[in-house]
Structure formats: C-alpha cells, structure tokens
Amino acid sequence: MPPDLRLSLRALRAFVTVVDCGSITGAAAQLHIAPSAVAAALTQVEEEMGADLLIRSRAKGITPTPEARALAARLRVLLEEYGETLDWGRQQARRLAGPLRIGYYAPVAPAFLPHALGPLLRDHPGITLELSEHDNDSAQEALLSGALDLILFTGGDLRPGIALTPLLDLPPYVLMPEGHPLGQIPCPSLADVADHPLVQLDRPVARPYVESLFATAGLRPRIAARATATEMVRSLVGAGHGIALLNMRPLTDRSYGNDALLARPLSGDLPPLQLAAGHALRHPRRTVTACLEALQTWRRTPEARALIVT
C-alpha cells in the first residue's frame, strides 16, 4: 500500500480528538469507540510519523508535543475538507444538474430522443446534455468504463453489469417511394420485398437483423445499395434506388431530398428489435434516474407509438 494510504481517517480523527481532549478515555467517549481502539490509532499514527508525538503519564494523561499540536492542526483541516467533500458529493448526487452523457444507437435515437427528454431539460435547466453516436458494442463498453451515464440501444447481447429498461418493441417495416407497387399491398411479405431492389442499412445490429429475416424465410434480398446512415437510406429510397427494411419510423414522410415516402408493415410473425435504455448496475445519479423516468413517460405517449409501423 502506498505510504499516503496507510493511515485511516478513523486513526487520524482519533489522534486529533486525543490532542483536543488530553486523554484517551475522553476521546473514546467522544468518538463512541473503545479506549483500546483509540490507543491503537495513536500508536499507528506515531509509527507512521516515526516520532513519539504524545507524552503519556498516569497523573496528567496525554500531553501533546508541539509537533503533535502542529500535526493535529493540519489534520483537522484535512478532516474538515473531507467532510465538506462528502457533503458536496451527496448534494451533487441529489440535485438534477451537471452533465448527462448519453450514448445512442444511431438508427433509432434521433427520431425521438430530443422530444422525449424535452420536459426533463425544460424543468431542470442545470442539466447539460452530452450525446454521442455509438453502435451497440461501443455504447456498452463506454457505459461500463464510466464514459457514459446512459445508453439507448437495441437490447440484444447485453453485457454483465448493465441494467436494462425496455422502451419499445420495433417490428420491421418496408419503406418505399410514393407510387411504388408495394404501396398497394397493406402488409407486404418478405417474399414481396425480395422481388425488389433493396437499400440496406449497413450498421451493426441492423444489417445482421435484416439478413437473418431473409435467411429464416429462405429468401435472398437483391441488394441495390448500402448506406451507414438512416437518412441516406431514406434518401436513396426516395430517389427510387430501391426499398428498405427499417424498424423505427421518423415522424416525417419525406426524405432529406424532399421525396415522398411510404411505410408499410410486414406480414408474418417477425421478431422485432427492442429499443432499450441501459445504465450501469451501480447506484445511478439522480439525473440518470430522472432521465429513465422521462423515457418511461415518453414510451406511453401517442408520439412514441407513432414511431411503430403496424
């Protein structure tokens, strides 16, 4: 153990109290511990300092040396600062202020997160929102390392040490340009989709998810293009380069290129992607708890349900 960590705060407090009281029994009564524990603490401090700091006598009790009084004065400041630091830390944990670091899975969070957290941020302007884009793996790594307070991701492959809060189940849907033949079918099948060029969202989770849908159905998609951004996929679809399979619908039916888009639910019992929030299992700050509560409130709103194509 490093030399600066050998002395416990309890031993330092006992030393200061003995210097103030002038006796071991008086210090023990004040600290509500046994006199033997106080005596052991004094020995520990003196051994660490390499000097006899207290003169012990049956008649006079404890007489501090000048060095002991000087040391006690410095330790008193240290103990007071320690207590103030603890009080500050507790206040920080209780107040809804400071940075709230959220890592989000890019294909889903931009469609809802700003609105979902709107009430929380309006009611608590001391919160500073810090958002960073991740895939599922990097989001969980950053959360467990302490670089993030909360993550929004699809809940598969959960790592140990992360608490999961499910938010929405997102079934797959077909995105197509306005006027596309599949728009005449209320619920196209995967077989219908396989007959048309596909624009694939090339992201971790999203790509293997779509590929597994086709593989399970014994189908092979006709890949026309791949893009790593959801809005690029939507723009390619709007421009007529193909159709796409996605899971969360933005609250707009137009692409960045101002092309009109249609969304249709897929037929069949297909597995959804689960949108979830995650936080470290250790006790979260109040800001994180409040954020989770805001997300739980949002998930019950019509705006949240509007993101699901059914």
Image (cartoon, rainbow, N blue to C red):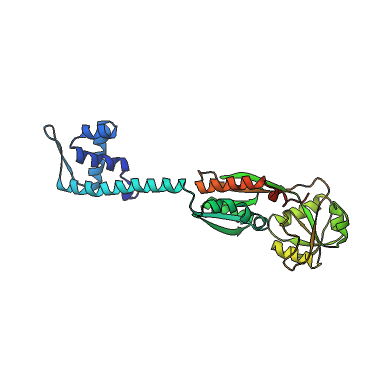
Q: Nearer the viewer, residue 166 or 222?
A: 166
Total labels: the figure holds 0
| Quadrant of res 53 | top left
Lateral position of residue 122 relative to residue 53, left or right:
right
Residue 195 in percent (x, y) is at 87, 59
Q: Nearer the viewer, residue 55 or 2?
A: 55
Lateral position of residue 120 relative to residue 271, left or right:
left
Residue 263 visible? The answer is: yes
Q: Nearer the viewer, residue 283 or 253?
A: 253
Lateral position of residue 44 relative to residue 89, left or right:
left
Residue 229 in percent (x, y) is at 69, 63
The residue at the point 24 percent across, 50 percent down is 74
Q: Is residue 104 above or below residue 269?
A: below
Residue 43 visible? The answer is: no
| Quadrant of res 65 | top left
The residue at the point 61 percent across, 56 percent down is 114
The residue at the point 87 percent across, 55 percent down is 192
Residue 98 in percent (x, y) is at 48, 54
Residue lying furthest left: 59
Residue 107 in percent (x, y) is at 68, 58
